[in-house]
Image: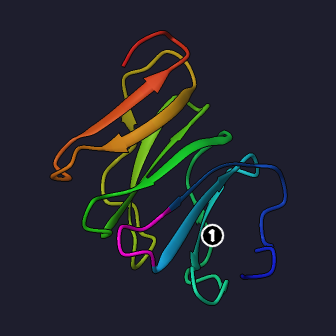
């Protein structure tokens, strides 16, 4: 068992394991996403920054190469899981905070749920 992973400056809203179990991603009210080594607890990348609001949901793609995040800034962002670089401009389409994000099983699509009562 690892000791508590510390790095965020506010409450953590979402966590997920990579498909191979080697990484953990966390999203926080501090507007950052962090990637941790699951066996070491060490941060693998600098904090991923770009959202202008709290991070409500994070998920890895099925192959573990991407991270998707949803925020109360009403955007979805896609990140390269090995470099932390954003892969696309922010995705917009909701008129409310994004509570949940997920990749399709083949990794080609992203689904999101929002408090605007849409998917």
Residue shown at the point (44%, 75%) measured from the top left: 21
Query: Pointer 1: residues within 10 angstroms few (<14), some, or many (20+)?
Result: some
Q: Could you tell whether 46 is left or right of 62 in the image?
A: right
Q: Is residue 20 magenta?
A: yes
Image quarter (top left, top right, bottom left or bottom right) of the C terminus? top left
Residue occupied by mark 1: 47
* Residue 3 locus on image (x, y percent): 80, 81
Most extreme residue toward the front, as rendered?
A: 1
Q: Say which quarter of the image contains residue 87.
A: bottom left
Residue shown at the point (74%, 46%) measured from the top left: 29
Q: Say which quarter of the image contains residue 115.
A: top right
* Residue 63 locus on image (x, y percent): 25, 67
Q: What secondary structure is the magenta-colored segment mainly?
A: loop
Q: Is residue 33 above or below residue 115?
A: below
Most extreme residue toward the right, as rendered?
A: 9
Region of the chain picked out in magenta, as a range: 17-21
* Residue 14 locus on image (x, y percent): 62, 49
């Amino acid at each position: 068992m690892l000791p508590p992973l510390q790095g965020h400056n506010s409450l953590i809203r979402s966590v997920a394991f990579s498909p191979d179990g080697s990484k953990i991603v966390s999203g926080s009210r501090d507007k950052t996403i962090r990637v941790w080594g699951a066996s070491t607890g060490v941060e693998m990348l600098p904090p991923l920054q770009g959202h202008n609001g709290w991070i409500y949901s994070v998920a890895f793609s099925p192959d573990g190469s991407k991270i998707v995040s949803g925020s109360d800034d009403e955007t979805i962002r896609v990140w390269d899981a090995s470099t932390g670089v954003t892969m696309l401009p922010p995705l917009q389409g909701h008129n409310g905070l994004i509570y949940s994000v997920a990749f399709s099983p083949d990794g080609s699509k992203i689904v999101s749920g929002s408090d605007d009562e849409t998917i």
